[in-house]
Amino acid sequence: MSSTEFLASIPLVVKLCLPVYARPANGRYEYAELDIMSKVKVTPWQSPFDPSFAAELLQRLRRTRWCDAVAADWSYGMSAKPLRALVDYWKTGYDWQRAAARINSLPHFRATIDGFDVHFLHFKGKGPSPQALLLTNGWPSSFVEYGKLASMLADPAAFGGSAELAFDVVIPAHPGFGYSSRPSSPNQIQTVALFHRLMSEGLGYSDYMVSGTDLGAGVGTRMALAYPDAVRGLHISAVVDPPLDATTAPLTAEEIAYQAKVQQWSADEGAYLHLQATRPQTVAYALNDTPVGLASWILEKFHFWSDAGSDLFEVFPPDMLLDNLNIYWATETIASSMRYYYEARHHRAPLRAGDYVKVPTAVCMWPKDLVIAPKTWAQRFYKVQQYTVQPHGGHFPAWEQPQLYAEDLRSFLTGLRAAEG
């Protein structure tokens, strides 16, 4: 299937959290290698595929030791029925060759920045003046979530839009996610600087927009703080809390209610966050060794955090869910993706009183996402130019509602251009 060669074997008994390296191979997209003072290199890349990997995974799935359950619904967490259905499809219906072709039909590249590899997709816009756009996903997602949205943004005319609003779409994997390298020591990589260098030095954009959900919204926010001259506009679906002090204006009733909802969400849904920010390595050994355990940990989030309703697979087809799962499984990055939370809590510099995002910002809230921040709360920390609460959608809006997402971004770009004259 691919000329890419796996350089790491996959043990059959216990799969520890060890690196899997792949040798870059020429992709079907033509791309000139860039070398900026030998510090940033961009090369075409393809996702590795090895039939023995699929065979080994199937062995693990067949040996699953299912636990008992006292309830059939989601009240205790992951419901057994949809999990078993997905695992059965993984074993008997999932077409590995088609999956590999599906993944490798995308425009993959790898940037090596001071020796650290960043995997990304790069969709070139089709229009007279495409706007550079960095799209950053959250957890437990990947570039798979953007399968429908990216094409809409890069080629709007093909979807009934105007070519004047085309984007050059760049979708990087966070450090320790998917095919990007994994940090090998605490606080080794600063994502904010890494992504800015990808856009500026690696791809040559003097300015760019950033759109992010979940963790990606936090990264985008800090990019706007650190590089306000480069970030032309910030589009986010989660807002960073402003650093409050004695001079802060009193909270409104709406803001007080919002904080209460955040606390309630944390109590009801935040166990994963607390665990991943405090003891991620403990559970990572188990999730890295059992594909059903990994599926349970991730699939639950697609149910509780989305607008899928009672039928999860109606919104998220099994192939999409398994493509996403296979990226975490094949690259063994569940541990490093969970450590991302620990790094943020223990090593990231806190915001300072007076910090404020001066970059024009669009806040796009999705009704079934974790919590909806009111406009006044966002305005305490961001220069809010556009604020929208969408009628549908949740934590994975690029897949759930790509049309609404694309329209909100195009509206924001139109507003930016009008404001800039």
Image (cartoon, rainbow, N blue to C red):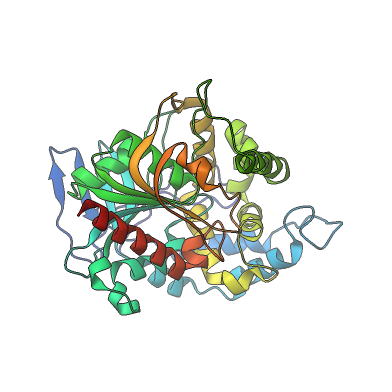
Quick check: 65 left or right of 305?
A: right
Q: Nearer the viewer, residue 99 or 414?
A: 414
Quick check: 385 left or right of 53?
A: left
Q: How many marks?
A: 0
Query: Image quarter for residue 252?
Result: top right
Quick check: 87 left or right of 366?
A: right
**Residue 212 location (% of width, % of height):** 42, 50
Q: Residue furthest right?
A: 70
Regarding residue 14, the answer to whether it shows in the image is: no
Regarding residue 309, the answer to whether it shows in the image is: yes
**Residue 209 location (% of width, % of height):** 30, 51
Dividing the image into 4 quarters, which one contains the N terminus?
Answer: bottom left
Q: Please give the name of the residue rendered at 24% of the width and 72% of the height, measured from the top-left corner.
A: 163
**Residue 13 location (% of width, % of height):** 61, 49
**Residue 20 location (% of width, % of height):** 42, 47
Query: Image quarter for residue 353?
Result: top left
